[in-house]
Amino acid sequence: MQTLLKYFSDFSETQQKQFEQLLPLYKEWNEKINVISRKDIDQLYLHHVLHSLSIAAIVDFKKGTNIIDIGCGGGFPGIPLAIFFPEVKFHLVDSIGKKLKVVEEVANAIGLQNVSTQHTRAEDIKNRKFDFAISRAVAPLKELWTWAKPLIKPAGINEVANGLICLKGGDLHNEISESKTRPKMMSIYDIFSEEYFKEKYIIQVKK
């Protein structure tokens, strides 16, 4: 938790309590349904929560923004961002139902009112539109953009153009080239000076 407070000092009392509850909740649920690697659970705040909040460091989503988290797994980046932006709606989608069970239980336990879930694949969602799609290490950028593009509204209410924002790591040159997109790429290590974030990036593709 101290890792978060090192970079974010203006949480409300509610937000601070919600973030503090994440570790015991994920430890409890991870024993039943493995959504975070066993060796990684003690690094929850650095590897998962702060990593997710790197998106909040570059975009200040306005009230009423609608966001879909594609392949949310155990709820990252969606859950930390939903705590950070209580007036933004987050729709967390995954093809594995038991992972969504963890997401729903965690969201309910900490009193999140702005999270919904759907057991489906992003490409099967019809008749819904969002301002942004977010994702973390789910699929190559080419596939992510293919899934996200039809779900994103052309016009938005934020200072940042509607589109896809995803968290990725390593050498991404081939992946970006194959995607035929022209994304904006930001180093997370430039935002959070923790060793863990070297070679981790925020990739932003505008609609």
Image: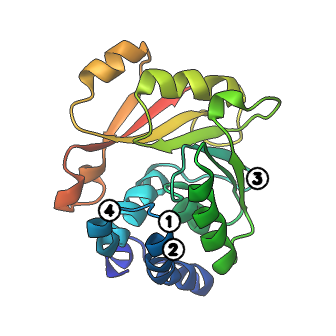
The numbered mark at residue 64 is 3
Check disc 1: other Cα within 10 Å, few if <14, some if 14-19, many if 20+: some
In the picture, which quadrant includes the C terminus?
A: top right
Q: Give the labeled residue for mark 1.
A: 33
Q: Is residue 162 left or right of residue 128?
A: left
Write down the quadrant of residue 57 in the picture.
bottom left
At a point 51% along the width and 79% down the height, the residue shown is 25
Q: Tell me the colour scheme of the image.
A: rainbow
Q: CA distance from mark 4 to mark 3?
A: 28 Å
Q: Amino acid at mark 1?
A: Ile
**Which one is nearer the viewer's eye here, 57 or 124?**
124
Figure label count: 4
The numbered mark at residue 53 is none
User: Nearer the observer, disc 3 or disc 2?
Assistant: 2
Q: CA distance from mark 1 to mark 2?
A: 6 Å
Q: Earlier in the sequence, mark 4 or mark 1?
A: 1
Q: Secondary structure at mark 3?
A: loop
Q: Secondary structure at mark 2?
A: helix
Q: Amino acid at mark 2?
A: Trp
Q: Is residue 2 above or below residue 86?
A: below
Q: Give the labeled residue for mark 2.
A: 29
- Whether residue 207 is visible here, answered yes or no, is no
Q: Are marks 1 and 2 in contact (CB under 8 Å)?
A: yes
Q: CA distance from mark 3 to mark 2?
A: 30 Å
